[in-house]
Image: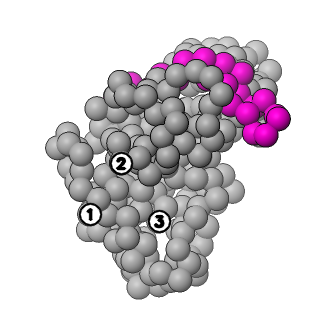
Amino acid sequence: MGNLKLKNVHTFFGTSHILFGISLEVKRGECVCLLGRNGVGKTTTLKTIMGLARPSDGEITFNGKSLVGLPPYEIAGMGVGYVPEDRIVFPDLTVLENLEVAAKPPLTDDIPPWDVPAIFGLFPSLKPLENRPAGYLSGGEQQMLTIGRTLMGNPQMMLLDEPVEGLAPVVVHEIVRQLKHLKELGLTILFTEQNIRFATEISDRAYIIESGLGRYEGTMADLERQPDIKKKYLMI
């Protein structure tokens, strides 16, 4: 399971029209990147999928079931995990408590269930910090914790909003390794990014958004062969 489809999705914030008919598809087990500069609608797309922003028109389905109009907790209960850009942690809870508070049983047995030992296996640098309040972690450690906490909900699909934004190169390398492992395990992933080099390392396909409009769809290999597209719509 883990198939996501958006068809002709429009989203407003107040009177501002942010998404203008976005359509995309993420198939089970794929890792797909939503590329584009700042302010083009990438985050709004994820928030619309997650029910944090409501579309004014269009269709959003996950495993054949409509997500439109559902509250975020119901969408999460259907197997969609969300890692926001701002790395929200419970600062007064320890690393271990942050993980335990998010624990949910898996919906299917397709993927081995995530528990605390499995998270520490994926993120070994968090293990020595398990009793440290999350508010005292570095930015990279907090990002690993937010990903780990989301995995504790045993999602079928994960949405990540610019997962390596502002992180040191050594941390970016570690997160690339971890996301590749999640992909190998069969987790479906949709993430937003400006860094095409990072996106190329882990993505199967990419969509490019510009001014709330879909401008490109194709494999990362196809995109690499189109420098004019990258120059026009991406920060390179």
Closest to the observer, 34 or 78: 78
Q: The residue tagged with tag 1: helix, strand or loop?
A: loop
The overriding secondary structure of the stretch rendered in magenta is strand
In this rendering, is residue 21 above or below 187?
A: above
- Where are the magenta residues, as a range? 6-29
Determine which residue is flagged by label 3.
145
User: Can residue 164 be seen from the camera position used here?
Assistant: no
Q: Residue at x 65, y 28 (%)?
A: 56
Q: Amino acid at mark 2?
A: Gly
Quadrant into which the N terminus falls: top left
Above-or-below relation of 152 to 127: above
Please name whichever residue, 32 or 222, is drawn nearer the observer in this view of the structure. Answer: 32
Where residue 87 appears, x then y in whole percent? 59, 61
Q: Amino acid at mark 1?
A: Asp
Q: Is residue 26 magenta?
A: yes
Find numbered disc 3 in the image and state the secondary structure of the residue it sits on.
helix
Which numbered disc, 3 or 2, marks the residue closer to the eye? Answer: 2
Name the quadrant of the C terminus: top right
Q: Which residue is mark 1?
A: 115
Kindly identify the residue that appears in the image at 58 percent across and 64 percent down: 88
Left or right: 101 in relation to 213: left
Mark 3 or 2 closer to N-term? 2
Residue occupying image coordinates x 79% and y 40%:
14
Look at mark 2 in the image and give the residue it sits on: 77
Cα–Cα gap, marks 1 and 2:
17 Å
Task: State the image coordinates of residue 196 (x, y, percent, origin top left).
Answer: 64, 34
Give the Cα distance between marks 3 and 2: 20 Å
> What whole-number distance in Å separates the C-alpha atoms at marks 3 and 1?
13 Å
